[in-house]
Image (cartoon, grey):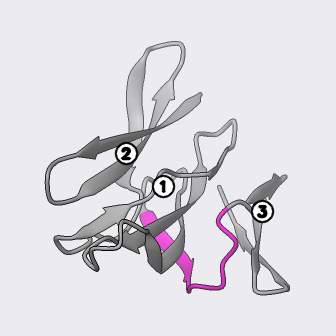
Amino acid sequence: MVAVATQNCNIDNCGTRITVYDSRSRRAIHTGLAMSPPAIDFFVMPVDSLVLRRSGGVAWIGAVAETGDGSGQLRPVQVEVRKIGREDTLTTVDSGLTIATDSLALGGTRIYWLKGTAAQAAGLR
């Protein structure tokens, strides 16, 4: 299994898609948006944290930043922990600005991340 995050941008916004491929058949087995669809003038940040199980289950932390204030600086306005399990269902596991975007880890059948200073966990099939 191989997981890939691809980012596509146009003049108004950027979107990131996560795709899991079976490396033997080279076919996509899962695909999903890195974040809930943003409005125009929002930028879906590149995915910094992504974990993949041998079963094909994948999880990641995505973020949306605001670009419309004219300063040129990206300001996060939403962060989400998302997953696609073996059952091929895209789920938002957690959301909030205090999620550390680089904190995702995989341990067996569970994913872990930081929200503020508290460790969080969820299952991943």
x and y percent of residue 69 in the render? 28, 80
Q: Earlier in the sequence, mark 3 or mark 1?
A: 1
Marks 2 and 3, the one that precedes in the sequence: 2
Q: What is the three-letter code of the residue carrying label 1?
A: Glu
- Residue drawn at x 39%, y 65% is 35
Residue hosting label 3: 110
Q: Which residues are magenta?
A: 90-101
Whether residue 23 appears in magenta in the rendering, the answer is: no
| Residue 109 in sight in this render | no
Assess disc 3: are there few (<14), some (14-19) or many (≥20) residues with their C-alpha within 10 Å of its C-alpha. few
Horizontal side, residue 8 vs residue 52: left or right: left
Q: Which mark is residue 63?
A: none
Give x and y (percent) for residue 7: 35, 43
Whether label 2 touches label 3, CB < 8 Å: no
Let me know if residue 91 appears in the view.
yes
| Residue 61 image position (x, y, % from top left) | 58, 63
Q: Is residue 93 magenta?
A: yes
User: Which element carries disc 2, helix, strand or loop?
Assistant: strand
Report which residue position mark 1 lands on.
87
* Amino acid type, mark 2: Thr
